[in-house]
Image (cartoon, grey):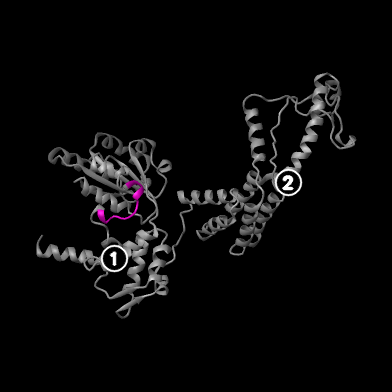
Amino acid sequence: MSLFETEEEAHRRAAQPLAARMRPRTLAEFVGQEHFLGEGKPLRRLLRADRLGSVIFYGPPGTGKTTLARLLAGETKSAFRQISAVIGGVKELREVIDEARRRLEVEGRRTLLFIDEIHRFNRAQQEVLLPHVEEGVIVLVGATTENPFFTVTGALVSRSRIFQFQPLEPRHIRELLLRALGDQERGLGNYRVELTEEALDFLSRACDGDARRALSALEVGVLSAERFPLKLTRELAEESLQRKAAVYDRAGDAHYDTVSALIKSIRGSDPDAAVYWLAKMLEAGEDIRFIARRLVILASEDVGNADPAALPLAMATAQACEYVGMPECRLNLAQTAIYLACAPKSNAVIAAIDAAIADVRQDRTVPVPFRLRDAHYAGAQRLGHGKGYLYAHDDPDGVAAQDYLGVEKEYYRPTDRGFEQELSRRLRVIREKLRRGREAADNGDSG
């Protein structure tokens, strides 16, 4: 490398943000993702056996997807080429593939093609890759923050191994921050900085497992200092760690995961978890109507008649959200989420209606018994409609001993929780009387 090239490289590096300069240069420097990259784990075994094929890296930002792709190219002695699915197209894709084919034929060297945000490629663009992935012309490494089973074509997914990246743990972030402070060549080692334990702990936890965000906050804190030596306190760290614009993309996979977490927390009777996931949704700017609708559904699906007050409360909350709006309606939503979480649970309602729908769909439709048919028009009696019908209010206990279905079925099976315990007691008496009515109908005692 010439003097000028060395100087140019130094200028490029100086212009890079700290997170880019501190990218690991070897697998030994890479932190996190031990579940697939640790000793004896799948990706590590593939590398040692020199059997690395096409893979898809799926996970949140700042967890090392791009960095690991570069390291894999080095480990496999492959040429590294990178395309962004946001700005790249089929023309650029074909040029890289043609180049990779020539390299393989002339040099016997493979090309690792890293496609960032591969979910942004449309189906036609993704299918361009298929034959070349199958032939081994390229080793594809696709990176995505979206669930690949929903956003990448099935053909490409079936030809790739999926490795899901997890947010980095605080201990990982801590290691990266200390490494950056001590590195004089690429990091901030030339600055006289004392990072307090409180600030280190805060940055390690508050960045939500995003190493890029933590390192950027550290860099802001250091470079914005007016004098050195600098004591970087928690207060300064908090000022440096800018609040995220969104907790999640409302159209993305994390949106559905968070909604799922809210519903399952309420179903699992954990009000604290429910309030947290609700807060995350609200902070991300989630549509309050969407949240209110989910609570209305849950009131019947997971609470049902175990607490009949759940549905009216959820409906009142939906109305209150329309009337009050944010930020005050967060109180209405939180109140209802907490109430539903603490309420007795029953899925007997959804079990009953789904079982009945299944019977109707399976051609088991039962004709309406003549006694129940409409008898309020001229000629209905000549057809036998209403014959033998027993008016329930004429019975002393308000339950007539007659068959209302024509077949013996028990779709609704109340639990022994909450108000359904009382309903269960009542139903035992009612169903016994209805059974006698059904037997009487079978014996021809009524029409």
User: Is residue 252 in view?
Assistant: no
Q: Amino acid at mark 2?
A: Phe
* Residue 386 position in % (x across, y down): 84, 26
* Residue 313 position in % (x across, y down): 69, 53
User: Is residue 116 in view?
Assistant: yes
Would you say residue 43 sits in the magenta stretch? no
For residue 130, above or below residue 313: above
Q: Which image quarter holds the N terminus?
A: bottom left
Mark before the other along the chain sequence, 2 or 1 = 1
Q: Which image quarter holds the C terminus?
A: top right
Which residue carries the number 1 mark? 180
Q: Are marks 2 and 1 in contact (CB under 8 Å)?
A: no
* Residue 234 position in % (x across, y down): 41, 72
Q: Amino acid at mark 1?
A: Ala
Q: Quadrant of residue 13?
A: bottom left
| Point 64% across, 24% down: residue | 363
Q: Which numbered dot is residue 419?
A: 2
Position of residue 395 in the picture relative to residue 139 (left or right): right
For mark 2, give the secondary structure: loop
* Residue 235 position in % (x across, y down): 42, 74
Tell me if mark 1 has few (under 14), some (14-19) or many (20+) residues whose alpha carbon lies within 10 angstroms of its own. Answer: many
Position of residue 436 in the picture relative to residue 312 (left or right): right
Cα gap from disc 2 to disc 1, whole angstroms: 60 Å
Query: What range of the chain is rendered magenta?
Result: 28-36
Q: Quadrant of residue 201?
A: bottom left
